[in-house]
Image (spheres, grey):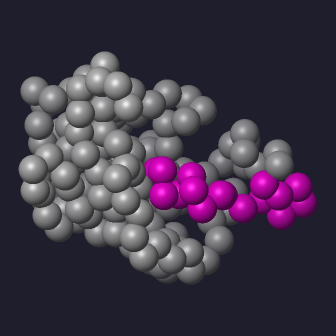
Amino acid sequence: MLDTMAIQKLIPHRYPFLLVDRILEVEAGKRIVGIKNVSNNEPFFQGHFPGRPVMPGVLIVEALAQAAGVLFFYSNPEMVGRAFFFTGIDGVRFRRPIMPGDTVKLEIVLLAVKRGFFKMKATATVDGALAVDGELSAMVMDANAPA
């Protein structure tokens, strides 16, 4: 549904930190399904871990967060250009490693929106097997506001 160029119009991330390759499904204001194709050429594999490459868990969570950002900005195009920040990562569990050659399915389901804060259920699967799951929370603010 959305390719890399369309994704880059919604979120500011760029190579090598853009971790969502394509959006397969989106229900504005409700849910999104995207994919990350994990290549052996990913820069983090040089050091994580030599001889046994495994995608770092924090980058899997970041890929999920980027998918959440795409959902937010797709649903609210007037907000594109604002910053989408994590405010919480709750109950995240890593259930299987993600390695070169894997296609990771990223799914975000919006659970609640309250005063500019968003709570989401996040899952990452590979070939139907659960790799990562948990809840993420985020907020949107002016990109130029002090942190």
Q: Residue at x 30, y 58 (%)?
A: 137
Residue found farthest to the right: 51
Residue found farthest to the front: 146
Q: Residue at x 72, y 39 (%)?
A: 43
Residue 69 lies in the magenta-colored region: no
Residue found farthest to the top: 144
Left or right, 22 with respect to 52, comes to left
Q: Position of residue 90 (x, y in %)?
A: 39, 70
Residue 60 lies in the magenta-colored region: yes
Q: Kindly tell me whether residue 83 is visible in this rendering.
A: yes
Residue 54, compared with residue 85, is above or below; it is below
Left or right, 71 with respect to 40, comes to left
Quadrant placement of the C terminus: top left
Instruction: Decide which of 25, 20 is in the foreground and name it.
Output: 20
How many numbered dots are placed on residues in this image? 0
Residue 108, compared with residue 97, is above or below; it is above
Q: Kindly tell me whether residue 34 is visible in this rendering.
A: no
Left or right, 57 with respect to 144, comes to right
Q: Residue at x 35, y 25 (%)?
A: 146
Left or right, 54 with respect to 126, comes to right
Q: Residue at x 72, y 62 (%)?
A: 54
Q: Quadrant of residue 140?
A: top left
Quadrant placement of the N terminus: top left
Q: Quadrant of residue 98?
A: bottom right
Q: Position of residue 109 (x, y in %)?
A: 23, 65
Instruction: Decide which of 70, 142 is in the foreground and name it.
Output: 142
Instruction: Decide which of 89, 11 is in the foreground and name it.
Output: 89
The magenta region covers: 48-63
Q: Position of residue 55 (x, y in %)?
A: 66, 58
Q: Position of residue 143 (x, y in %)?
A: 30, 24
